Amino acid sequence: MRSAQRKVMDTLYVSPHPDDLRSLLALIAAEYCPSPPRIVTGDPPAPLAQSRPALTLANSDVVLTGPCAVGWFLSSGLKKGKRDAKEESQLWQWINFAENELIPIACAVVFPLLGVTGVDKQLQYSSRGELKRVLGILDKTLQPRTYLVGESISLADIAVSMAVLLPFKYALEPSDRKALTNVTRWFLTCINQPKFQKVLGKIALCEKMVPVSPKASSTPAANSTSAPAAEGPPKTEAQLKKEAKKREKLEKFQQKKELEQKKKQQPQSEKKSKPEKKELGVITYNVPTPPGRRKYVEAAWYPWWEKQGFFKPEYGRKSVSEPNPRGMFMMCIPPPNVTGSLHLGHALTNAIQDCLTRWHRMRGETTLWNPGCDHAGIATQVVVEKKLKRERGLSRHDLGREAFLEEVWKWKNEKGDRIYHQLRRLGSSLDWDRACFTMDDKLSYAVQEAFIRFHDEGVIYRSKRLVNWSCSLNSAISDIEVDKRELTGRTLLPVPGYKEKVEFGVLVSFSYKIDGTDEEVVVATTRIETMLGDTAVAVHPSDPRYQHLKGKWVIHPFCERKLPIILDEFVDMNFGTGAVKITPAHDHNDYGVGERHSLEFVNILDENGFLINVPPPFLGMRRFDARKAVLQALKDRGQFKETKDNPMVVPVCSRSKDIVEPLLKPQWYVDCSEMGKQAADVVREGRLKIIPDHHLKTWFNWMDNIRDWCISRQLWWGHRIPAYFVTVDDPSVKPGEDMDGHYWVSGRSEEEARERAAKRFNVPAQKISLRQDEDVLDTWFSSGIFPFSIFGWPHQNEDLQVFYPGTLLETGHDILFFWVARMVMMGLKLTGKLPFKEVYLHAVVRDAHGRKMSKSLGNVIDPLDVIMGISLEGLHAQLVESNLDPLEVEKAKQGQKSDYPNGIPECGTDALRFALCAYTSQGRDINLDVNRILGYRHFCNKLWNAVKFAMRALGEGFVPRDKAQLSGEESVTDRWVLSRLCAAVASCGSGFQAYDFPGITTAIYNFWLYELCDVYLECLKPVLSRADSDGGREAEVCRQTLYTCLEVGLRLLSPIMPFVSEELFQRLPRRQPERDLPSISTSSYPESAEFCWNSEEVDRQMEFVMTVVRTIRSLRADYNLTKTRADCYLQCIDGDTAAAVRAHSLQIQTLSYSQSVHAVSAAGDAGGAVPEGCAVAIASDRCTVHLLLKGLIDTEKELAKLAAKKGDLERQMEKLNEKMEKSDYKEKVPAKVQEQDAEKLRQSQTELQKVKEAIANFQKMM
C-alpha cells in the first residue's frame, strides 16, 4: 500500500539544465527506484528553491535535499540491502570522493569554458593538472574492477560518473582519455546503461577543449545556490568590464594551450635531454656463481635453508638427546593469532628472536626455535561469522554448533597459514616440522588435562561475579581486549546497533527522596540508566552532613523498592555531594560494597543489552535508549538536578567497538593467590630474570595484588570447557543449582565424568544425567601452557625431556601479565618447573613522531610493504579496503600523505631487520622512521660493492690460509684493521649476551662502513697497484688480511642480515675446502678467544692519522677542492710526530686525496719550510695542516664570492639582532621561536668567522 502511494505522491524537484550534475545524479537514481517519483523541473516551492535536487515524501512532512540523500533514498533497486558493512563503507567513501574532491576540480576546469561567472578564482585557476592527478588515482583503482563497489552498478558509480561528466564532455581530449584507459572504459560502461541513457541521452565526448556557447536554459550548477538565472536585469558597466576581462583571460588561456600543443608536436630530438634520475636498484653481481649456488634473491635462500634442515636442532647430530658441551638453547614463539597479519610489532619480535636463535645456533648449541599459532577464539569466530553473513546470509545459530565449527576449520585450513608465509619472508629460522596450533589434538589434550587437574585441586572453581561483557559478541572478554577510551568531557561515540551516536563524558545529578520525610539526597552518575538497578545509597561514616540519615531509607522513584542509606569508607566525601548510588550488579566498585553490606544484586541487563527486571516503560528497552528515557522521566518527576562535563574512561571492546558492560555471570575462575605468590618469589629469589629490570615493579605489583582469573568465554570456537553439570534421578539427592560447585564434575570424556559423578553422589551411573558447559576457555589459558603443551605434555617424551624448561622468552612488555605471568604460574603449578630462565621484553614500536601505531592515524605499516615497497596510492587503497569509518579513512590518508608523500621505497628484509635491531634500546619505545630503514638498504649496497671490489682484489687464484692468524709481516694498516675487527667481535659477543642490539649493529656498521670500506680498502689500492717484488709480498699479506675481514665480518653480520651475508659468503673461497661449510648459518660465530689481536698502540697511531686526514678533508671542503689534488705540509711540534707523519705518509696521502704529503718541523729544518699560499688548520696539539692552494684556485674570484657571502651574513645578523633587541621581544615571541632565533644567530656568527678567516688566507696568497 505504501509503495503505491509513493508512486503517485512522492515528488522530485530538479534543475532543468542538462549539465546540472547533481540533478542528473538524482534523476538516474530515480530510474532504479521501484516506485519512481513525480519529476518537477519547474519552479519548486520557495523553501526548496536553493536546495535542488529535493524529494518530498508522500503523506509526510519529510523533505530530503541534496544529491547524496536523495540518491540514496531513490536507488533502492541497486541491491542496497544485500551489501555488507565493508561495501556500504566503500560506497559512502566514493560518494564523499565525488562530492569533495572530484566536483570542485571538475567545475574549476569546465566552468570557465562555459562562461560561468562568480566561480572561486583559486579553484578556477587550479588547471587541468590537478584534475588529471585525481583521475589518475581513480584510474589505478579501476584497473582490476568493472564497477567501483561490488560486481554491479551502485550509487557510487552514479555519483562519481556524474562528477566526471562535465570534464568528459568539455575538457578531456582524446589524448587525455587514452592516458586514462580504465576511467574511460568504466565511464562509457556507465553512461551506456539503459537507465543512464534514458536521462542523459547520447553523450558526445570532447574532441578539443575550447570555450562553448552557453546553453539556452539556466547556467549549470556545481552548487545550485551560486548559479545565476537564465534571464535577469540588464548588466551594469562594472559587470560588463568584468566579463570583458574574463574573455581576455580565456583568449590568453587558449593561446597558451595552442603553444603547448605545438611543443608536443616538435621532434623529441629538439629537447635537451635531462640526465635520468638514478634509481637505487639491486647491484648486479657479475662474478660467476659456482654450480648449485643461487643468485642473490632473498626468497631463494630460505627454501634452501629449510630443505637442508639447518633450522632443526637435530642438524649435525644423531639426536637431540646427544650431550652437547656447548649447551642447549630453546625458545618458543609468542604464537600469533591465526587471523593475524604481520605488523611492525611482529617484525620487531621476530627480528630479535631470529637474531638470538641464529647466534646461539652459530655458537654450536643445540638450538630450537619452536613455531606455533594461536586459535584466537573471539577474533576467528568474528571473522567466520562475518564471512557466513556476507556470503550465505546465515548466522552461526542458523548452522548449529557442529556445522559452524566445521566452517571455522575450513576457513583455518584455507587461510590460517598466511602468517607462516610472512614469517618465512622475514627470514625466521623456525623448525617448521614442530609447528603447533593451539587447537591441535596434542595441545587440546594438554588444555583439557590442565583444567581437570586444576579443578580436582580446587584451583578452578565456579562463581557468579562481574565480568567484562560485550553485548555485540555475546561473550565475556579479557582485560586485554578492553580499550580504555579517555574522554575529557561530553563526547558522542558510535555504538554498534545504534543509528545515532551516544553521549558519554557527562555527570548527571538527581535526587532520592528520604522515606517518611521531606528531605532528599542528591547523587550523581555517568550511567544514569543503571539507577534502575540501585539497591543502596552510601555515605562516608565520618561525613557530618549525613549523620542524621543513619538507618534511614530512600525511595526509588520508578518502583516500590526502598534503598538503605549505608555507611562505607570507600566513599570520597569531597567528590560531588558525598553521597553515592550503589548498583552492585553493574559496577566493579559497587560490587565490593554490595558484598560487604549483603545488598540485593539486581541485574537489569540481558546478554544483548536489553533491560530486564525493571518496571514499564523501561522494560525491554535497549540500554542507551533507556539512558534518554530515564533522564526524561527524572525531569518529569522533578528529581533531575543537573548535567555537567566529566572527564572519564569508557571501556570499549577492541574487537566489536561496543561499549563494555560489567555484568553478573556464572563463570569458571582460577584461584591465582598461591600461584601469584610463587611467581613473585621466583623473581625475588633470582631464579627467573626479567630484562630490563625496570619491569620488576610492574611484575611485583601484579603478582602481589593478583585477582582471580575468569576463564569462561561464551563462544563456540575454542577449547570447550570439560565440565559437566550433574542432575541425579534419585529423590534422596536434592536438585543442584548452577552456582553450586558440588554439582559440577570434570572429565576427559562424558563417561569419565559420569563415573566421577556417580561416585560423588553414591548412586548408580544410570541415574546420572550430564550437561556439558557450553562455554569455551579463555585463549590465554591454552597460551599459558604453550611452553610445555607443544612438546606433548602430560605425556613424557624426548622433546619434553630435552627442551623443557626452555632458555628464554622474548616478547613485548605489553603482555607481561596476560601471557608471561600466566606461563610462569601454570608452568610452576603443573610441571614444578619454570618454563624459561630469562624473560627479555622489547619496546613498543611507534611511528617517526612517537605516536602509537593506529589504523585511524594511517601509520600502521605492514612489514612486507617496507620489504617490497608500496606507492602512496597503494597505502590509500589499503585504507579504503579496511573496516575504518569513512571519516577516519580521510584522516588516515592525510597522515599517510604527510609521512610517506612518495610511498614507502623498497628496502628489503635485511635492511628492515637491521633497522629494527638498531632501534631496540632497552627501556624506551621505538620511534621508527622508514627513511632510516632506507639508509640500511644503502648499507646493504655498500656491502655488495665492498665484496665486489674485494673479490677482484683477491683474484681468481687466491687461497686463504687454513686458519686466521697473524704472519708477523702485517703493516700498521693491516694490524689496525684486524684490531678493529677484534673490537667488533668483542662488542658483538657482549652485546648478544646483554641483549644490547644497538651495540651489536653499531659495532658491525662502524667496522664495515667506516673502518673496512672508508679506510682499509682505500689504503689497499696503492699497495695492490705496486709491481715490484716487495709490493707483491706486501699485497699477499694484505689479501690474507682482507679475506679475514670479509669472512669474519660476514659471520658477525649473519644473525641480523641472513640473506645478504649468505649470498656474499657463498662467493668467498673456503679456508679448508675439504670441510666446506654449506651455509654461513652453520658456521661458527666469531669469538674473542680466537680473535684477540687488539692493539691499543696501533689504534693510537691510526687515530692520529685519521685526525690529520679529517682535518685535510675539512680544509678541502672549505675551499671546494672536490677533484683537485693539493700538496699538503704537516707542521709537527717534535721529531717523533714528524717521524709518525713520514711513516704514515702514504695512508694520509691516499685517504685525504692529496698530491703529496710533507712533514715539516716547527723550526722548518725537516723537509723544508712551509711555502706561501697555504690554507691552515690545526689537526692536534702536535700537528698543524698547511694545504697549498696557490695556483689551484682563482684567488680574486674566490675573494669576490666570500665578500658577497660576508655581506649577506652581516645583513642577516643585523636583521636578526634588530628583531631580538625590540623591547617586547621577550614577552610577545614564543620561547621556541626565541630559541630558534638564538641558534640562527650563533650559526651565522660561526659562519661569518670562517668566512673572515678564509678571506684573510686568500689575501695572503695575493
Image (cartoon, rainbow, N blue to C red):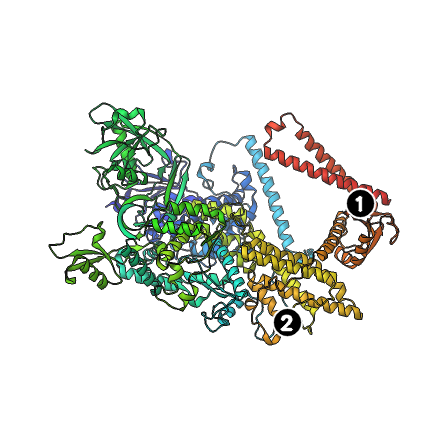
Label 1: few (<14), some (14–19) or many (≥20) C-alpha neighbours in 10 Å: some
Quadrant of the snapshot with the C terminus: top right
SS assignment at label 1: helix
Please, is residue 873 above or below residue 573 in the view? below
Q: For the point 49% across and 62% down, which residue is it?
A: 428
Q: Residue furthest front?
A: 685
Please, is residue 1133 above or below residue 769 in the view? above
Q: Earlier in the sequence, mark 2 or mark 1?
A: 2
Label 2: few (<14), some (14–19) or many (≥20) C-alpha neighbours in 10 Å: some
Q: Nearer the viewer, mark 2 or mark 1?
A: 2
SS assignment at label 2: loop
> Which label is found at residue 1069?
2
Q: Position of residue 107 (x, y in %)?
A: 50, 44
Choose between 323 and 241: the one closer to the eye: 323
Residue where numbered disc 1 is placed = 1198
Give residue 1205's quadrant in the image: top right
> Which label is found at residue 10?
none
Q: CA distance from mark 2 to mark 1?
A: 53 Å
Name the amino acid type tagged 2: Pro
Residue 181 falls left or right of residue 978: left
Name the amino acid type tagged 1: Glu
Give residue 384's quadrant in the image: bottom left
